[in-house]
Image (cartoon, rainbow, N blue to C red):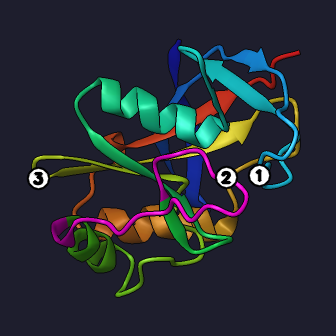
């Protein structure tokens, strides 16, 4: 299900960002798995994933390239992290250039949205928010939205993914 969500850019100035509410299936926690302190796993077509990697898979199904921008660990990921295994990746040069242009020269700017996706010359960003929690867009994420828009990324290329932690 998709619906517009009002995001205040400044007092009296708001934009509506498409917001999706996907349903995910819970998966059991596997002992020894790197959980990033998330304390959950989702089952998407038999893969045990964090929500961020599940959304990467959903973009890939639609023919987009996509990565989870793991700002905390300063890594790009399209695979589930594993303890003791370095499975981050380097973005293709064209995507690095696009992200640096949008982010003021940085690949891991504070406030960058969780998912960076691309298809041909188009880019998109998605931010995941756990519903029924205090998780909401932070000021630095709104600043990223405004800056990316000023660099030519249309507001309709931003998505908010509000999801429920499956029981």
Q: Residue at x 66, y 19 (%)?
A: 43
Q: Which residue is mark 2?
A: 82
Q: 100 above or below 72?
A: below
The x and y percentages for residue 18 are 46, 31
Disc 3 to disc 1, how far (Cα)? 34 Å
- Disc number at residue 121? 3
Dot 2: element: loop
Tell me where the magenta segment starts and ends, as one range: 77-94
The x and y percentages for residue 101 are 26, 78
The reply to whether the C-beta atoms of the residues labelled 2 and 1 are less than 8 Å apart is yes
| In-image side of 66 versus 130 (left or right) | left
Q: Residue at x 26, y 37 (%)?
A: 64
For the view shown, which residue lies furthest in the bottom direction? 105
Q: Which residue is mark 1?
A: 34
Q: Is residue 25 visible?
A: yes
**Which quadrant of the figure has residue 57?**
top left
Q: Residue at x 67, y 17 (%)?
A: 24
């Amino acid at each position: 299900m998709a619906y517009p969500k009002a995001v205040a850019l400044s007092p009296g100035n708001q934009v509506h960002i498409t917001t999706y509410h996907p349903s995910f299936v819970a998966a059991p926690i596997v002992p020894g798995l790197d959980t990033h302190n998330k304390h959950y796993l989702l089952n998407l077509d038999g893969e045990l994933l964090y929500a961020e990697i599940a959304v990467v898979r959903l973009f890939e199904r639609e023919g987009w390239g996509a990565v989870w921008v793991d700002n905390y660990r300063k890594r790009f990921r399209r695979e589930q992290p594993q303890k003791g295994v370095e499975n981050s990746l380097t973005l293709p040069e064209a995507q690095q250039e696009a992200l640096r242009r949008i982010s003021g020269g940085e690949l891991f700017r504070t406030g960058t949205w969780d998912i960076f996706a691309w298809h041909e010359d188009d880019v998109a960003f998605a931010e995941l928010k756990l519903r029924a929690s205090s998780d909401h867009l932070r000021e630095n994420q709104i600043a990223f939205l405004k800056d990316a828009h000023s660099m030519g990324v249309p507001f309709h290329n931003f998505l908010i993914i509000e999801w429920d932690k499956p029981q």
